């Protein structure tokens, strides 16, 4: 009897060690378990689970709290995030919560044709002329939408399952054939070309947003963002992966000097910045040589923009940081505990 119990104890102990080893392996990879899951509703931009609870401060800043004058042309920062969160600011310092009319996770913003367009999960599209009042639009899809850009008099939106939809005005939307079922998380325009990137290193290009062609990235790592700056496209992904291209067709590898996931990126004030987890980010003057930096926060960073002579970063738990030089960062009060996915700047008419 003692021998049987001894064998059972050893078996249980071995099982426990095996289970723990699996957990450690996941943690040691920095989140690799979700790097390759093709579902932005579950893993795409969630370093940590987003809580449905908000802090008490969450309702302190409302539409009527901060008075913003509206001249013929004004500076406007817009940040979007979990549970229909939309924040706006004229200076990047004081932020106002807006009523979006949506509970969906919102993921990106673009401006064109005197219209702001926000996209998000479950085919969510919202439009506004001033960033204050938002209207729901019919996208014609239930797919999770991950990003949007405006160029050539056209809004182009990309999302899960290779979804691509376009619109001339943000109101009427048309489905396009992307020639891929792979989820798309980033889109940008430059050199007369739209470029969309996403899961498993997918890259597709189009001259008009309608007809798309697959390209070779030479990586299977998921891309989260693509930008166009200094005559070059840059695609950013997990494991510190960066690819560059002058035309969107041929892509070259760039050493980032990091293994962290790169979630968002922007070019401003002659500086490239790509942001990632635990408050870390990398900078470059030319997009080729990169330097590791730290923002002073431990929160995961998800988006960045530049406007009004300052950089603005956003991230988990309502994190907003600003900097005039990309070196010294100051924390701003966002009035929300929601994860913020991206931030956008534009001079709005």
Image (cartoon, rainbow, N blue to C red):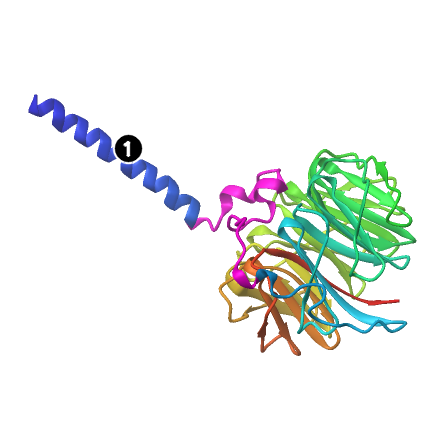
- Res 58 → quadrant: bottom right
Work out which quarter of the rendered image holds the C terminus and state it.
bottom right
User: Residue 268: where, in percent of width, then height?
Assistant: 73, 70
User: Residue 99: where, in percent of width, then height?
Assistant: 71, 55
Tell me, yes or no, if residue 150 can be seen here.
Answer: yes
Q: Tally the marks.
A: 1
Say which residue appears at 76% left-offset and 44% top-offset: 158
User: Residue 179: where, in percent of width, then height?
Assistant: 79, 34
Q: Is residue 162 above or below residue 29?
A: above
- Res 109 → quadrant: bottom right
Work out which quarter of the rendered image holds the N terminus and state it.
top left
- Decide whether residue 32 is among the magenta residues: yes
Q: Nearer the viewer, residue 341 or 32?
A: 341
Local packing at callout 1 (Cα closer than 10 Å; few below 14, some 14-19, many 20+) is few
Q: Residue lying at the far front in this picture: please name it.
A: 64
Q: Nearer the viewer, residue 341 or 34?
A: 341
Q: Is residue 5 above or below residue 86?
A: above
Circle 1 is placed at which residue position?
15
- Decide whether residue 77 is among the magenta residues: no
Q: Main secondary structure of the magenta part?
A: loop
Tell me, yes or no, if residue 275 can be seen here.
Answer: no
Q: Residue lying at the far left in this picture: please name it.
A: 2
Q: Nearer the viewer, residue 108 or 104?
A: 104
Say which residue appears at 71% left-offset and 71% top-offset: 66
User: Residue 216: where, in percent of width, then height?
Assistant: 72, 43
Q: Nearer the viewer, residue 17 or 109?
A: 109
- Res 18 → quadrant: top left
Q: Secondary structure at mark 1?
A: helix
Q: Is residue 8 left or right of residue 255?
A: left
Say which residue appears at 42% left-offset and 48% top-offset: 27
> From which residue to which does the magenta span run?
28-57
């Amino acid at each position: 009897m003692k021998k049987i119990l001894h064998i059972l104890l050893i078996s249980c102990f071995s099982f426990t060690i095996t289970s723990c080893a699996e957990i450690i392996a996941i943690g040691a990879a920095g989140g690799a378990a979700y790097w390759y899951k093709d579902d932005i509703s579950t893993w795409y931009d969630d370093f940590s689970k987003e809580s449905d609870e908000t802090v008490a401060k969450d309702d302190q800043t409302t539409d009527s709290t901060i008075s913003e004058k509206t001249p013929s042309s004004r500076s406007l920062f817009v940040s979007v995030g979990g549970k229909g969160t939309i924040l706006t600011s004229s200076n990047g310092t004081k932020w106002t919560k807006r009523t979006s009319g949506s509970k969906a996770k919102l993921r990106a913003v673009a401006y064109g044709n005197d219209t702001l367009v926000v996209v998000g999960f479950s085919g969510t599209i919202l439009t506004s002329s001033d960033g204050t009042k938002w209207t729901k639009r019919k996208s014609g899809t239930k797919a999770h939408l991950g990003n949007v850009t405006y160029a050539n008099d056209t809004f182009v939106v990309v999302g899960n399952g290779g979804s691509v939809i376009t619109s001339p005005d943000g109101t009427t939307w048309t489905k396009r054939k992307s020639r891929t079922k792979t989820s798309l998380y980033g889109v940008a325009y430059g050199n007369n070309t739209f470029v969309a990137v996403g899961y498993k290193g997918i890259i597709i290009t189009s001259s008009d947003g309608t007809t798309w062609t697959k390209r070779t990235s030479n990586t299977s790592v998921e891309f989260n963002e693509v930008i166009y700056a200094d005559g070059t496209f840059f695609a950013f992904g997990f494991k510190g992966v960066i690819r560059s291209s002058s035309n969107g067709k041929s892509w070259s590898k760039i050493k980032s000097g990091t293994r962290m996931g790169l979630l968002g990126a922007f070019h401003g004030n002659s500086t490239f910045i790509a942001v990632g987890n635990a408050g870390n980010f990398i900078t470059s003057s030319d997009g080729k040589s990169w330097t590791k930096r730290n923002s002073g926060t431990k929160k995961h960073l998800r988006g960045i923009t530049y406007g009004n002579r300052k950089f603005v970063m956003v991230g988990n738990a309502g994190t907003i940081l600003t900097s005039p030089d990309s070196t010294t960062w100051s924390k701003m009060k966002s009035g929300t505990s929601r994860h913020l996915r991206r931030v956008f700047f534009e001079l709005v008419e």
